[in-house]
Image: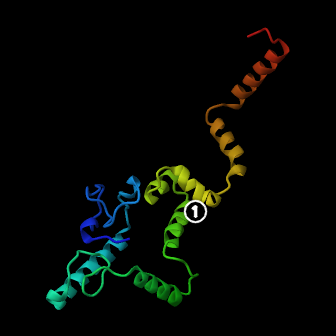
Amino acid sequence: MVTTWNYVCLEKTEDVPKSGYMFTTLKTKNSKRQIPIPEFVLNELRTHKQHQEEWKGLVGQLYEDNDLVICTNTGTLQDPRNVVRVLKRLIKSTKVPNIRFHDIRHTHASILISEGVDIVKISKRLGHANPKITLEFYAHLLPNVDNDIADIFYNATQSKITLNNWKKSCGQIADKSKNPGVS
């Protein structure tokens, strides 16, 4: 993925820039979306941009300003293999399990699911056309709440039906079964 600073909003906002976030052609219409990021990531991006601006000043005319967020020391497109190499070095130095670059996306979705985030919100964040796609990939990660369903139903009905009303309703049902013609 290649993006330019023009497509990165360094301020917290609810507005989606009309230009989108991708430098390349978008994969689908759902690819163009706002992806909220935490404040610490915004701070890191601000710091990165400031360092880039300082570097541009030092390098001068040798710097080819393409407004890229991730670029070489001369401002040109970064070879994606270099990003993967950096990822592998980070993985090795932190002693976390080896993953592919795209696995970061899956890890992100898995953590959101494990934290109980609504699947529709996750689907939108991932750019899936609909939640069905997200469920096909991640349904195995959804917590098994089958055992809780009976309790959930019971608790919901308790706030609406008193025990006496329940018994009365059951008695009417029993009477109807004895006298089917009576309503």
- Left or right, 59 with respect to 134, comes to left
Quick check: 174 above or below 47? above
Quarter where residue 74 is shown:
bottom left
Q: Is residue 60 above or below residue 144?
A: below
Image quadrant of residue 43?
A: bottom left
Please determine whether, in this image, residue 149 is positioned above or below residue 181.
below
Instruction: Please give the name of the residue rendered at 55% of the width and 62% of the height, measured from the top-left corner.
Output: 115
Could you tell me residue 34's position as x and y percent? 35, 58
State left or right for residue 165 relative to residue 6. right
- The secondary element bearing badge 1 is classed as helix
In x, y percent, where is residue 114? 58, 62
Please identify the quadrant where the C terminus is shown. top right
Q: Nearer the viewer, residue 82 or 95?
A: 82
Q: Quadrant of the N terminus?
A: bottom left
Q: Nearer the viewer, residue 163 or 115?
A: 115
Q: How is the image coloured?
A: rainbow
Q: Nearer the viewer, residue 46 or 138?
A: 138
Name the residue: 79% across, 8% down. 181
| Residue visible at 48% across and 76% down in the picture | 101
Residue at the limit of the structure toward the front, as seen here: 25
Q: Residue at 66% of width from left, 44% of height from top? A: 152
In this rendering, position of residue 24 left or right of residue 112: left
Q: Amino acid at mark 1?
A: Ser
Examine the rendered structure and indicate whether residue 72 appears above or below residue 105.
below
Task: Please identify the residue farthest to the top as the structure is shown.
Answer: 181
In the rendered image, which residue does mark 1 sit on? 114
Counting from the top left corner in percent of width and height, residue 33 is at 36, 57
Residue 24's x, y, as percent?
A: 33, 66
